[in-house]
Image (spheres, coloured by chain):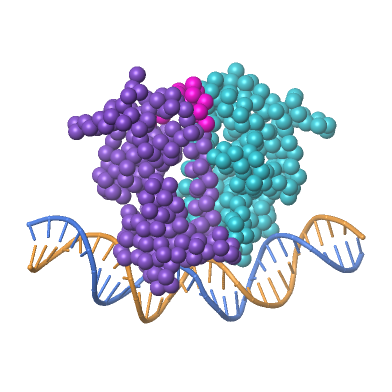
Chain colours: A cyan, B purple, C blue, D orange
Amino acid sequence: MQVTIDSTRLSDSSCATKDAVRCTNCNLRELCLPQDMTPDDVQRVNALVTARRRVKKGESLQRAGEPFKSLYAVRSGSFKTCIATEDGRNQVTGFKMSGEIIGLDGISTNVHIIDVIALEDSEVCAIPFSRLEEASREIAGLQKQFHRIMSREIVGEQGAMVLLGSMRAEERVATFLVSLSRRFRARGYSATEFHLRMTREEIGSYLGLKLETVSRVMSRFHETGLISINQKHVVILDADGLKDVASPSTAGN
Amino acid sequence: MQVTIDSTRLSDSSCATKDAVRCTNCNLRELCLPQDMTPDDVQRVNALVTARRRVKKGESLQRAGEPFKSLYAVRSGSFKTCIATEDGRNQVTGFKMSGEIIGLDGISTNVHIIDVIALEDSEVCAIPFSRLEEASREIAGLQKQFHRIMSREIVGEQGAMVLLGSMRAEERVATFLVSLSRRFRARGYSATEFHLRMTREEIGSYLGLKLETVSRVMSRFHETGLISINQKHVVILDADGLKDVASPSTAGN
DNA sequence: CGGCGCCCTTGATGTGCATCAAGGGTCTTG
DNA sequence: CAAGACCCTTGATGCACATCAAGGGCGCCG
């Protein structure tokens, strides 16, 4: 049961640009860059979006080493962000869903250091960074929102550090599932039943675990009745129980 | 009109504010907020710094839950940043040295989520965030630099995630030492001989290891001649060797 | 439709780091 | 100077997760 992205279903089978790119009527407005802005300012943000870009499953939106030009707002679909170290390690550092901003890593040096790969056929709005900077000098609300987004990214990564640095495998997986659940709900999807877009290996990479461990932990959650899982189809049966596993000693969330 | 202050050492033995706080003649200029800015803009940044604040060893600069008002630039000394989870876990998420900016976590929700504690008697420049936002709407160079700093923070945390997610204990400790070495050198200190300001436990917390493991790994590095370590005094004897341990398979960096 | 490739699951075994434990060095303070 | 509080080191043991290995489900494509 796929929920359509837009209530006003713009079925433009042709090249999707201009008209379809309307922050004003995008239902991600509340999650994305224009969050909490006046209708007037939303219009101006809208003008920043120069293009919409489709990225097929498995293709990359940006690659490490490429020059940084634009930020991207995920319009539909989802992505994984990966970092490859000199010595050949390759780690997933996050998953991006609709309304989230990609490319912030490029600002510091004007070169991307992160690879971003689509987990399914996806679509993004491109926002040239120089124009965003200009506009946020004029629109205080945009500036504020952009700063919030960057800060949120920082805070989120701190959370990931805690997860990687001090949680046990079950806590990590539970935390991951709870987080996914919240994010789906925030987007109007079911919080208790969803489809994993990533493989066990990608989850493991993100959580600092091996794919077998992810699989085993999920099977255990299944056995104990916390969730039901069949391949990539997840049903959360006991949300509170899962949250307990995610942060123990906190009696009931 | 404060052009002449430069080399005229204003030795105000009294309360150190105003005059002493001069980005213009601060030797951290190249590492801090005014990086790469015109002398004129540096003056304007300087005007943002409302106060200098001393923090004694063990005291906190900011605490989770406090309202967010200001960013802080470390002027001297050093800090650890910690995050405490609901369930009582407490993890060190970073160490801040002179010239680095603290408080970015507060921007997203206007409440700090991170505790920042001085590792030694330290001093910071306080920068009210609302004024920074105002100013960066007017000064493009400041805006750019501030964005760079936030992005750098994001990139740095991605690095920490790789460390925590996929490195073995020896790699983590070696990476940590190499990173410290670089940061000391950037500040004009010796890159090969320095004093650890944090305990083994704090290092361990940051690296996702137990203090005993940190101690053991360092002892091993000592035995193999990579470093010399005596309590908190570190000498790096074989910088290349240490880098090899930090990222193996990269022949000689 | 049948074969192949990818992904997932599950069991057996191994190991890196945690945990438990003891003791020593160094700084602080009365 | 002596007592106590930290912090660090080092050894012995245990365990959580990695690794190795085998097989099954499902979708893709010739």
From what the image shows, is residue A96 above or below residue A135? below
User: How many numbered marks does the figure carry?
Assistant: 0
Relative to B211, is A251 above or below? above
Query: Chief secondary structure of the magenta span?
Result: helix
- Residue B16, image x and y in percent? 24, 32
- Residue span colored magenta: B127-144
Is B132 included in the stretch rendered in magenta? yes
A233, D30: nearer the viewer: D30
Q: Where residue A172 appears, x then y in whole percent? A: 52, 56
Q: Which residue is located at x 47 percent, y 30 percent?
A: B37
Residue in the foreground of this view, choosing between C1 and B15: B15
**Of residues B114 and B248, the one drawn nearer to the viewer in this rendering:** B248
In screen coordinates, is A175 left or right of A61?
left
- Location of residue A184 by image quarter: top right
Q: Is residue A146 visible?
A: yes
Queried whether the magenta region covers residue B160, the answer comes back as no
Residue shown at 32%/24% (left/top)? B4
Image position, residue B108 (x, y; %):
47, 35
Q: Is residue B240 above or below residue A46?
A: below
Q: Is residue B50 left or right of residue A228?
A: left
- For image coordinates 45% across by 65% down, the residue present is B238
